[in-house]
Image (cartoon, rainbow, N blue to C red):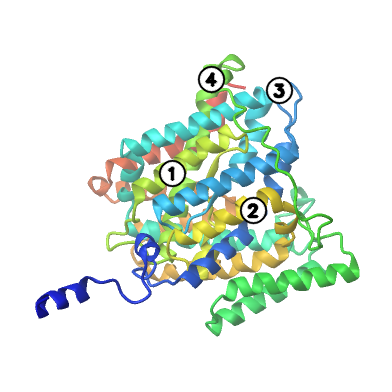
Amino acid sequence: MSESQKVADRSSAPPPGVNSVDRYFKISARGSTFAREIRGGFATFFTMAYILVLNPIILGSAKDKFGHQLDAVQLTTATALVAAVMTIIMGVGGNLPLALAAGLGLNAVVAFQIAPLMAWDDAMGLVVLEGLLICVLVLTGLREAVMHAIPQPLKQAISVGIGLFIAFIGFVDAGFVSRIPDAANTTVPVQLGGTGQLGGWPILVFCLGVLLTIALLARKVKGAILISIVTMTVAAMIINSIADIKAWGLTTPAWPDKIVDTPDFGLIGDFSLFGAFGETTAITVVLLVFTLVLSDFFDTMGTVVGISAEAGLLDEQGKVPNLGRVLLIDGAAAAAGGAASSSSATSYIESAAGVGEGARTGFSNLVTGGLFALALFLTPLLTIVPLQAAAPALVAVGFLMMTQVKHIDWDKYEIAIPAFLTIAVMPFTYSITNGIGAGFVAYVVIKVVLGKAKEIHWLLWGTSLLFLVYFAINPIEQILGVK
């Protein structure tokens, strides 16, 4: 072999420690390691494992048109199954640290707005239709084109708004912030703690968790978020064993009576694709599907952009890698959630906790998805992490995402005002979709007022018009006589 051939062989050989898995997921190429990906996968799971408890509560507490309720055990199995399968598919196919599960907000729409009008299988059929429609939008290139049409400063504003939003979620989930019971009689809608002041062991666990997390982050300790979650869970279990506290919320930090439980797949495949058309008017069906599509479409868009930006994966034009596949998988997840009767599954902003731990690739999804798969059998064990121990991660990641606000030109009002509305409306209305809609509409209006209408991409015109319909959906329903 000649010297030149030897040099060529050495230059084409993979770096030391790089194997086929590393090359496929681009772990080293994205500046990550297997350890970081694994830690990120665990962190993401622990910050979103609450859905295994919350989704059955929301869907299981509602009744359909005929008074039927879904079984909580079957809902838990369906929720875990869809989360496991779609999170792993996103990791392998999309190669983003983006986990998926039943969407909060979307499940409430299904439970309290759609189900009362029809049978459960008909309601879930609408969810499947929504997912299939989103897949069509992806395959036609429309969904990806909309994302590319968004100005870069608005994308940054979306990330910042999501940061504030998930921090707010963390404060609320932990009980640090609560809704005032008689808010109708006061101008103040929320308060500190449950009574206007902090009190109780669960709140103490959260506060200590926040302090521990930010201290570890400031010290740049590897695994800071995961260390905090595990440490505060152990502390909560110790406290609960001594005091037997009843105010933990959805999950109690106590060792379960049994570790293994048998999954019940009874709801899988229990849907009727077009049954809704026989239960209510076609106009009602169209409006319901429109609401689901618009919420899922833009929630996912904001989440994908926000997570990718925080992970440093956006290119110079602000584009997300493998965007077409990512959006197609997300659409398929919505359909899969309906087919499993667990409601529409979507990308989770809590994935930011994994990114905060260093996850940069879809390999972390294999860990998160694997844990959801284990949850099919180990739900009692894996749901002992109280919200008060997991919520500090959301607060910390909210700070990390907030740092992108420095990239927005606040002296340029035509972008600063839409950016501000995007950032503010998300946490104030508890909706990513509402924030994006407010920003889009404001951007178009200001450009028109300034005589710069030609600078507006035609897709922004179209999406802004859709958002106007979205915001005015109740008057439109009244005009059309929809009940």
Q: In terms of image quadrants, where is residue 350? A: bottom right
Q: Earlier in the sequence, mark 2 or mark 4?
A: 4
Mark 1 highlights which residue?
A: 329
Q: Quote the CA–CA distance across marks 4 and 1.
A: 23 Å
Looking at the rendered structure, the secondary structure element under dot 3 is: loop
Residue 139 badge: none
Q: Is residue 373 visible?
A: yes
Instruction: Indicate the amino acid at tag 4.
Output: Phe
Left or right, 375 with reference to 84: right
Cβ–Cβ below 8 Å for labels 2 and 1? no
Name the front one of labels 2 and 1. 2
Q: Quote the CA–CA distance across marks 1 and 3.
A: 32 Å
Q: Position of residue 221 (x, y in %)?
A: 55, 81
User: Relative to 163, is 221 above or below?
Assistant: below
Q: Nearer the viewer, residue 402 or 313?
A: 313
Within 10 Å of disc 3 (Cα), the crowding (few <14, some 14-19, many 20+) is: some
Q: Position of residue 39 (x, y in %)?
A: 55, 69
Q: Quote the CA–CA distance across marks 3 and 2.
A: 34 Å
Cβ–Cβ below 8 Å for labels 4 and 1? no
Within 10 Å of disc 2 (Cα), the crowding (few <14, some 14-19, many 20+) is: some
Looking at the rendered structure, the secondary structure element under dot 4 is: loop
Cβ–Cβ below 8 Å for labels 1 and 3? no
Mark 2 highlights which residue?
A: 374
Mark 3 highlights which residue?
A: 65
Cβ–Cβ below 8 Å for labels 3 and 2? no
Cβ–Cβ below 8 Å for labels 2 and 4? no
Q: Nearer the viewer, residue 187 or 105?
A: 105
Q: Quote the CA–CA distance across marks 3 and 4.
A: 16 Å
Residue 274 badge: 4
